[in-house]
Amino acid sequence: MPGDETRPDVPPVPDEDQESVPFETPDVYGAYPRLKDDQIARLAQHGRRRAVDVGDELIREGERCETFYVVLSGSVAIVENYGTPDEHLLRVHGPGRFIGELGLLNGQVAFYTAVVRDPGEILALSMDQLRDLVTRDATLGDVVLRACLGRRALLVGQGAGFRIIGSRYSPDTRRLREFAARNRLPHRWIDLETDTEAEALLRRFGVGPEQTPLVIWRDTTLLRNPSNAELARFIGLPALEPGDGRGDLLIVGSGPAGLAAAVNAASEGLGTTVVEALATGGQAGTSSRIENLLGFPSGISGAELTERAVLQAEKFGARISVPAEAARLERRDDHYAVGFADGSEVTARTVVLATGARYRRLRVPGIEPLEGSSVHYSATVYEAQQCRTDPVAVVGGGNSAGQAVLFLAGYVPQVYLLVRGPSLEAHMSRYLIDQVERHPRVRVLLHTEVTEAMGDKTLEAVTVVDHRTGEHRHLEVRALFVFTGADPHTDWLSGVLALDARGFVLTGAEAQACSVPEVWQSQGRDCLTLETSLPGVFAAGDLRSGSVKRVASAVGEGSMSIHFVHRYLGRTAAPGNTDTSAHTRPKQAAWLA
């Protein structure tokens, strides 16, 4: 980007349609639509016109924005680190454009400042006015939603937002980076060992390397090794509401199953709370592209699928809190209490467990010290950007491994896919197999297993064995991505629910067979299909024993679980009250009709 065009008071530039980067880069995400005259007219019926002058700040970085702005005349600059030595121009919006990105919709703080560049007139609407309008105008709502999602993706890719300074070998640095990346928070990592900017920033703030990791924003805010919860509150991610609440439904986990359950429950009037230990989306949220999900013929990234689902759940009034790590489950009279690692607690009449599963760690000599620095269990843009010039290896033969291979092949010169079995057909979908086998940068090694990882602070090579020949060989790779079998997130449920031999939650007839007979006799019924060994506690998605480990299946189970929640609530409703949705419906925070 031009280094001398970082202030809003530089001479006016030509109209957007004739501008070069950063004013008119290709709009591959649909992030910069120009509103039509009739759309602006409908907005004007609800909003307020206002004259603006050069330097007026409409949105301030680090503060929540509760106003939706449309540029009627003049122009507005989108600037990161406005008023600091690191000021950086991201975009200029002219007439017909609107200001805002995903944080506008979900209550996060702004990651940039919107400042008037050329005097003119803007249209201002409160968020309540905008919600009311787009609820009744699906076309306008979709334009706003798509643009906000696209702008968040661009901010993440540009490294806008806050900065994390720390060593790649520090567990806390890796923790913060993973939390930011998984929650799709715009940020940039500054490596303490290799980035020359790190030393200057440490001097500026008067801290030593031993006090890292640090989170820095706008050179005015410094967090020293914050917890995930502290960072979440700082950015504006919603916290658990105080008090027990005693809602209708608590959903533990926010992958595809949990979010599908939230959308269906909240849309049907159930008081719904969703809690998540790390980040919405689960494993699916880290997928670069999901191509076999109904309704998305050209595929959809896990991040976009997650963001759309979160907004859809919030549209109907579901409350979503991140991070909130469930630590215990117990029954109290006609409710269930879930306690969290921070000591807080939520109670609800029913519970849907949707905590999913995590990829099993690879247990070979030399690998443990390299985990997080060059051995990864997900493949996002942050890991890929570290490997641009180096070959990498992916371990696994399922769809997740196939998607990771294709994603990484867009960044690195060579990707080895290491598969223990004799073929890809056993666990990978045909459409992925075809793409993997055709890709010029991908080499598939069947009957192959990693036996050792080599390297001091970063991976330098792996030793693999070919089980057909017994031959051992070295592959010089600088990163290893592992997508092998999954272990369920059910440690906290051991001794509380019936689990199978691998720790997955039993449901239906299998759960009933492991229960004390009196439990179901007192209910006067059999265990429902997705119900666990505790009546009123249901399981959906990857953590459920016997489930199909696919996104579409998880969505289906999450949706179906609400049918059984209604059946349970219908049987346990107070005498004379057969309406399981008789409570006051939450106000919709709607974006799409």
Image (cartoon, rainbow, N blue to C red):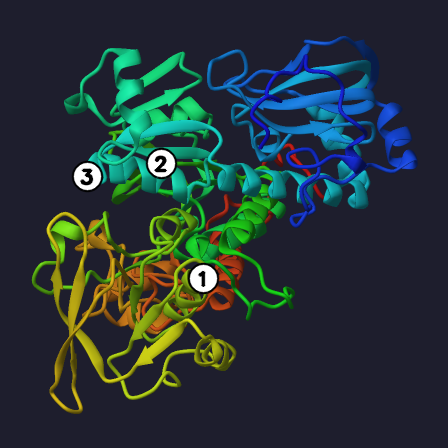
Crowding at mark 3 (Cα within 10 Å: few <14, some 14-19, many 20+): some
Q: What's the residue type where badge 1 is placed?
A: Phe
The three-letter code of the residue at mark 3 reads Pro
Give percent across and percent down for residue 70. Answer: 78, 25
| Vertical side of 552 occupied by 59: above or below | above
The residue beneath circle 1 is 407
Q: Dot 1: few (<14), some (14–19), or many (≥20) neighbours within 10 Å? A: some
Task: Identify the residue at horizontal 52%, vertical 26% (top origin).
Answer: 111
* Residue underneath mark 3: 171
Label 1 and label 3: CA atoms lie apart by 26 Å
Horizontal and vertical percent for residue 67? Answer: 68, 20
Q: Which mark is residue 148?
A: none
Q: Give the residue pinned by disc 2.
A: 323
Question: Image check: 415 left or right of 585?
Answer: left
Q: Are marks 1 and 2 in contact (CB under 8 Å)?
A: no
First in sequence, mark 1 or 3: give its number: 3
Q: Position of residue 526 (x, y in %)?
A: 38, 68
Residue kind at label 2, given as amino acid type: Pro
Q: Earlier in the sequence, mark 3 or mark 2?
A: 3
